[in-house]
């Protein structure tokens, strides 16, 4: 249990670091258009140029046009970091040696569920037979068998 607690502490440290970087990234992304235009105008004036109102408005409109791009750069960096961690975990998992398949349940021929002549579906208001998807369904499941019902949500 002590080993598990130590691993969990390390994991929590990395989660906290990731969250702090993520919040910083979001804040930087939101503030970058304003800070970029302010810095550009400041350096323009400090380099000895005269700032006119037309130049200021033109500069601000350019940075507003670049706003989404400036917001997405820091978010892209944190997404890249998360993607890198995911790839490392997948690589570690895929590099593990193969294990023989485990038997989950004993195989017996005892029938545990049996359906005969069933109608299955979703009722439609006013007509009980119109929403039936399966008619005259016969199904027999033995202990140990594995069954999967596959389909889109709402398809029955």
Image: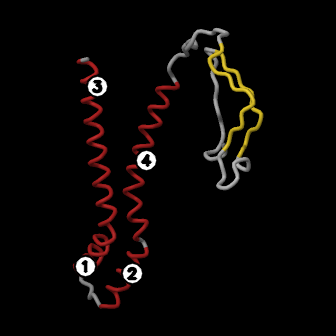
Say which quarter of the image contains residue 86. Answer: top left
Left or right relative to 134: residue 25: left
Q: Are marks 3 and 2 in contact (CB under 8 Å)?
A: no
How is this picture coloured?
secondary structure
Q: Are marks 1 and 3 in contact (CB under 8 Å)?
A: no
Q: Dot 4 corresponds to which residue? A: 80
| Earlier sequence position, callout 1 versus callout 3 | 3
Which of these two is toward me, 115 or 69?
115
Per the model, the C-alpha gap separating discs 1 and 4 is 37 Å
Considering the numbered disc 4 on the image, is that residue within a helix, a strand or a loop?
helix
Considering the numbered disc 2 on the image, is that residue within a helix, a strand or a loop?
helix
Q: Which mark is residue 47?
A: 1
Q: Residue at x 39, y 51 (%)?
A: 77
Say which quarter of the image contains residue 56. Answer: bottom left
Where 60 falls versus 117 (above or below)?
below
Q: Which mark is residue 61?
A: 2
Considering the numbered disc 3 on the image, is that residue within a helix, a strand or a loop?
helix
Dot 3 crowding, Cα within 10 Å, few <14, some 14–19, many 20+: few
| Earlier sequence position, callout 3 versus callout 2 | 3
Q: Residue at x 29, y 49 (%)?
A: 21
Image spot of residue 85 (x, y percent): 41, 37
Per the model, the C-alpha gap separating discs 3 and 2 is 50 Å
Image spot of residue 120 (x, y percent): 69, 38
Q: Dot 3 corresponds to which residue? A: 7
| Earlier sequence position, callout 2 versus callout 1 | 1
Which of these two is toward me, 41 or 61?
61
């Amino acid at each position: 249990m002590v080993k598990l607690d130590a691993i969990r502490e390390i994991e929590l440290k990395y989660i906290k670091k990731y969250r702090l970087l993520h919040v910083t990234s979001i804040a930087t992304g939101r503030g970058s258009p304003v800070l970029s235009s302010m810095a550009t105008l400041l350096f323009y004036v400090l380099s000895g140029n005269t700032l006119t109102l037309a130049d200021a408005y033109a500069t601000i409109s350019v940075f507003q046009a670049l706003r989404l791009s400036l917001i997405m750069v820091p978010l892209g960096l944190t997404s890249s970091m998360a993607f890198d961690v995911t790839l490392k975990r997948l690589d570690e998992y895929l590099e593990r040696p193969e294990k023989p398949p485990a038997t989950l349940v004993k195989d017996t021929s005892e029938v545990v569920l049996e359906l005969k002549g069933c109608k299955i579906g979703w009722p439609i208001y006013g007509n009980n037979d119109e929403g039936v998807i399966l008619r005259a369904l016969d199904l027999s499941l033995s202990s140990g068998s594995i069954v999967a019902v596959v389909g889109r949500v709402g398809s029955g």
